[in-house]
Image (cartoon, rainbow, N blue to C red):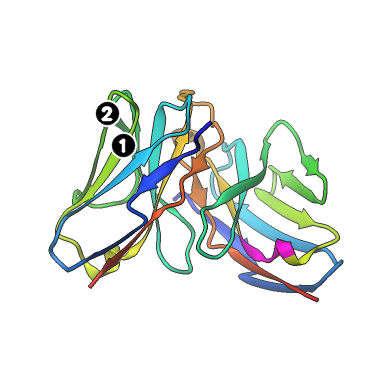
Amino acid sequence: DAGVTQSPTHLIKTRGQQVTLRCSPKSGHDTVSWYQQALGQGPQFIFQYYEEEERQRGNFPDRFSGHQFPNYSSELNVNALLLGDSALYLCASTPWSGSYQETQYFGPGTRLLVL
Amino acid sequence: GENVEQHPSTLSVQEGDSAVIKCTYSDSASNYFPWYKQELGKRPQLIIDIRSNVGEKKDQRIAVTLNKTAKHFSLHITETQPEDSAVYFCAFAPYSSASKIIFGSGTRLSIRP
């Protein structure tokens, strides 16, 4: 039973570039959430996808966008990269449960460095 | 706003002693409170969670207590071991947005041999 997987593991970009990060949820899970974890801080919620739609969004600018595919995998896109976007980007998956909070299982993350 | 305060930011305890981390959350209607452990360079891993219908939950050396009236919850680790060294995050799910998790700023726990 595969857990949550993410790719790539590391990425280096320069300011102004665009980046796409990928996530495959745990088997049996159909809901994917993305988090940004800056160095020395707790993860911050970016958004959540279910049924290929964005269901919840945190306090992140429109430069951050996402997509969910029919197989439940997801992408996070960040445009016009800033130095402050350097962080560990974590994907978490759960089964959809409406208003009931299910345990979120995290992937290993993608470490993005913006130069 | 939706936030959780976590204390202390760093904690050093002698191996075998107990460690306690405390958190205060903002949303009185919240009913889900997970704790995550993150080792250096690794993903956050759920170690224990509690829902508001109980005041305490234990799993071997780890326990969590919840005081909904005071909006406090705490993690207790007994008989600490070197492998307990990590950053610990408390978190909660806001009632209005149960599908997301709000994390604390973390506690770096060091176990002295």
Is residue B38 part of the magenta span, yes or no?
A: no
Q: Amino acid at mark 1?
A: Ser
Can you give x and y, in whole percent of width and height, for residue A94 in the image?
48, 32
Quadrant of res A84: bottom left
Residue linked to disc 2: A69
| Label 2 SS | loop
Q: Amino acid at mark 2?
A: Phe
Which of disc 2 and disc 1 is earlier in sequence? 2
Q: Position of residue B111 (x, y in %)?
A: 75, 71
Left or right: A38 in relation to B80: left
Q: Which residues are magenta?
A: B83-87
Name the residue nearer the viewer: A91 or A22.
A22
- Between B55 and B20, which is closer to the camera in this rendering? B20
Which label number is shown at residue A74?
A: 1
A44 is higher (above) or lower (below) than A83:
above
- Image quarter of the C terminus of chain A: bottom left
Q: Chain of mark 2?
A: A
